[in-house]
Amino acid sequence: MSKNNDGVQLIQLRDVTKVYPGAGGGFTALGGINLCLSAGELTAIVGKSGSGKSTLANLITGIDRPTTGEVLVGGTAVHALDESRLATWRGRHVGVVFQFFQLLPALTVAENVMLPMDLCGTYAASAARARARDLLARVGIAEQADKLPAALSGGQQQRAAIARALANDPALVVADEPTGNLDSRTAESILDLLRALARAGKTVVVVTHERDALRKFARVVSLVDGRVAEQTHATPALLGEVRL
């Protein structure tokens, strides 16, 4: 993994709005968002339910598109890509971690991690298997590689999901409520793992409602009613030394 690129803007949102169609003119999930996030930064997106947190994450990853405005990631105008190019771009450059893991139940843990490599053709089969096992070792569950997801605890499944997100060595990792279904101790370990990714050079964006964990983040972006209400930065000393 690469070293941190402090100060280099990886993510830029310019005058972004997102309106979902509906009666009475629709629902404005995001309005006038302007946001820049630096490469190698660990950012939390916080706010009450309905504030637009997940919508913002989905726009950054290209899972959803803005109604107006621009979304640029690593210089790519994500909002302007057609569906085919968007899928290719996301597969190679973005790792997504979901709250409910979304591991395929009929595949082993290693096969789940190999799946993005197979879909993007980034590694030959033998190399993909070796890389999957290496990634599972990095997240601390190498011994679970040949088990089905149902045999793993919630925390182990989330670690497997993080390994899968890293499969194609993306510059950006986005996690939407990754600790929402975990006990506090397991949640702490998952956040430490995500923090270690940022220290190793990844740009990590985490949607979370757990304000007790915000001390772990370099930047906290607070949303209120679809707008950025506040941005705060942590003192580097508070981030500690956590390694992957």
Image (cartoon, rainbow, N blue to C red):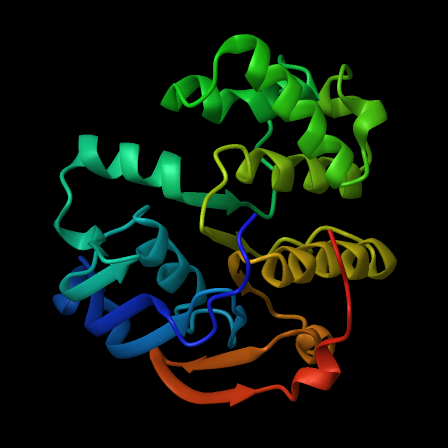
Q: Position of residue 127 (x, y in %)?
A: 57, 16
Quadrant of the rendered image containing residue 140 = top right
The residue sitting at 37% across, 83% down in the picture is: 228
Q: How many marks do you count on the picture?
A: 0
Residue closest to the far front:
3
Quadrant of the rendered image containing residue 90 = top left
The residue sitting at 20% across, 70% down in the picture is: 17
| Residue nearer the viewer, 129 or 57 | 129
The residue sitting at 78% across, 17% down in the picture is: 147
Whether residue 104 can be seen here: no
Instruction: Tell me: 38 left or right of 219.
Output: left
Q: Position of residue 164 (x, y in %)?
A: 58, 33
| Residue nearer the viewer, 216 or 240 | 240
The residue sitting at 32% across, 77% down in the picture is: 35
Whether residue 106 can be seen here: yes
| Residue nearer the viewer, 132 or 162 | 132
Quadrant of the rendered image containing residue 87 = top left
Using the image, determine if residue 195 lies above or below residue 161: below
Using the image, determine if residue 131 lies above or below residue 19: above
Instruction: Tell me: 200 left or right of 79.
Output: right
Q: Position of residue 222 (x, y in %)?
A: 48, 82
Q: Position of residue 189 (x, y in %)?
A: 80, 56
